[in-house]
Structures are given as C-alpha cells and as structure tokens.
Amino acid sequence: MKTLVVGGTGFLGGAIVDAALAAGHDVTILSRGQTKRTQPSNVKILAANRYSSLDVLKNQNFDYVFDTCAFTPDGVQNLLNAVGRKIKRYIMISSISAYSDFSKPQLTEREPAPTAVDADYVVAQKCIQAGNVDAVALGASYGRLKRACEIKATDMLAQKSISLRVGLLVGAGDYTDRLTWWVRRFDQGGDILAPLPKNQTIQIVDVRDVAGFALHSASQQLSGIYNITSQPIDLENFLTSTINIIGSGAKLKWVDQETIQKADIQYWSELPIIAPTAANFRHFLNINTSKAMKAGLKIRPLEDTIKPLLEWDRTRRNTPLKCGLPKEKEQLALKLTAKNRP
C-alpha cells in the first residue's frame, strides 16, 4: 500500500510511520521540516506547509492518508484537494477534547460535540500566521476545531473518512512529559504527593497502540468516529502499579484538594495526567471505548508502556521536563498534610 503520513516526523506520526513500514507499506511523509527525526532510507520525505502550496503532492497517488496534524477544516480541505478523492481511506487524528463537556462519565461517539464558531476561526488564523498551530496555541478552541475538521473530512470523503478521537497519549519520546514526570519522580523515590480521591479515574494510551489501530482501521476499511484510549483505571491502582513496575521505593502520601489549593498546586500542569476538578472536566479521563474495542483496538499492559518510557527517560535526566510539581510545592503540601493529621 502507498501511504502518506502527514506530520510523520512527530511523536504519533513517527509511530504510524514505524507501524506502516513494519506492515510493508510504501511510506511517504509530508512535513514542514521543523521536527527532527531520523527516518529509514526507504521513506520518502516531502516538505510543505499545508496552509500554503501543496504542489509537492501533485502526481502522487496514495491508498491511505494518515493526518496527525489536522487543526482546522481549511487545512483538511487543502490536503484532501491535493491528494484527491481516489484514496481508499483518510485517517484523521482527532481528540477526545472534541466533546468539550466531561461532566458525564463514559461518553460515547454518539454524544453531541460542538463545532467551531467564528471566534475559533479567528484564533486559528492568528496561530497560522504565527506559524504555531497546535493544541496549546489553539487553547479553548482546539476541541471545537477538531470537530470542524471531522465534519469537513466526512463532507468531502463520506465513508472513506475515519476520525480517531485519541485520549492522553503517552510513551517513550512523548514531548509533553506528562506521564514521564511521574515515572521520573517515582524513579527518584521518597515520599511523593498523590492527590485524593484515590478512586478518580485515569486513562492513557500508548502511542504504538494508537498507531496500530490507525493502520488496522485503514486496512479493515472502517468509517466514522472512534474513541481511542485505555479502559479507565483508578488512580491508586495506576500509581501503585507504576511504582511496582519501576521497582521504586517511592511512597505515596495522599493529599486532599483543600491542601493542594493551599499549596497553590495546579492540576494537569503541575499534577500531570490528573484532570482539573472543575465539573465539566470531572470525567475527562473516563471515556467509553467499547466501539473501538469491538473494532479491533488493542491496548498493551501498563508494564509495556512504563518500562520503555523509563529506559528512554534515564538517557535524558539532564533534560528539564515541561510539566510537573515543583519540589517546594510538594514539600509544602506534605508538611501541611502531616500537620493536620491527628
């Protein structure tokens, strides 16, 4: 199969390239050339910006197109006009952020998702002009724009379009450092802050599992929207399992929300993979994946994610992480907790 991976030098794009090569595909990457990733010699690389000319795709024929960086419907339209309507499947990497409201648990693909409005397109245009179009830059507009991308792809390709609403993506090479922070912190040992309640849910998905299902969905000629993440696991089980996999002497010290607020600790950014406490984020990491599971989604055991991530991070311990809890805030919260114990 002739396969195009848009954003094939990135974290997920690179995993899709690897999976496609392993499956015997003839792989071409479309990239702006800003991300450095060593590619096998049998991979063809085309440099272009999807928001300007895509002439490099002229006279190219592809069976599958995997799009890991679709952030605006115009960007989707430009790409699909360039590759043509004869492709067998277009697989777009969307996001669970498309749902916007997570006040209810176990959202399915049937749940309505809001699409972009004029203000979102203004934000997107500013990002395009600045040359920085990603989830962080788009902010609150990100989820609605992803939904608009899904709609555009379906309008143009109907049943040939597949949208994968991916959850919290993790693995060796993850540029967000969210799970990496916990793995590094556990590897260091000692007393470690863990936010109550213990039974709050966590969902993560290994980048290789997303890549595997992306290829599977194309080869099986699936259509429509799929939630792609793991089954929910309670936080206590997740953290203790991770400590055991690492073989660390770390000890969890459970801290309540009031103490976390007193220590000015921020969920998600300083406590990575822990969803904010706001009502509309309560079940952000409790999404229903039964449709994808029935269609063939395979989720590897947690150990198969943690061990490669640990090995990778041990080679880069001088690299500051992009998120995580400052030591002084952790110590303050632990002192406050100890003081309040009877």
Image (cartoon, helix red, strand yellow):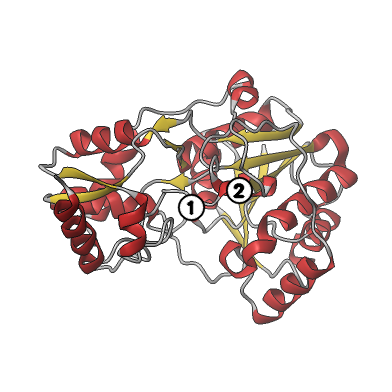
For the question of whether residue 212 can be seen, the reply is: yes
Q: Position of residue 268 (x, y in %)?
A: 43, 56
Residue at the image position 28 percent from the left and 38 percent from the top: 239
Numbered disc total: 2
Q: Is residue 63 toward the left or the right of residue 256 in the image?
A: right
Name the amino acid, label 2: Asn
Crowd class of label 2 (few under 14; some 14 to 19; many from 20; radius 10 Å):
few
Name the amino acid, label 1: Pro
For the question of whether residue 42 can be seen, the reply is: no
Q: Which residue is mark 2?
A: 280
In whole angstroms, how far apart are the C-alphas of marks 1 and 2? 9 Å
Residue at the image position 20 percent from the left and 58 percent from the top: 336
Q: Is residue 3 toward the left or the right of residue 82 in the image?
A: left
Q: Position of residue 231 (x, y in %)?
A: 48, 28
Residue at the image position 82 percent from the left and 58 percent from the top: 82
Q: Residue furthest top?
A: 294
Front-lying residue, 86 or 112: 112
Image height of 20 relative to 54, above or below? above
Q: Residue furthest bottom?
A: 130
Front-lying residue, 300 or 266: 266
Residue at the image position 62 percent from the left and 52 percent from the top: 68
Q: Position of residue 1 (x, y in %)?
A: 67, 36
Front-lying residue, 186 or 8: 186
> Which corner quadrant holds the C terminus?
top left
**Of helix, strand and loop, which one carries label 1?**
loop
Q: Which residue is mark 1?
A: 276
Crowd class of label 1 (few under 14; some 14 to 19; many from 20; radius 10 Å):
some
Q: Position of residue 258 (x, y in %)?
A: 35, 54
Name the image quarter holding residue 224.
top right
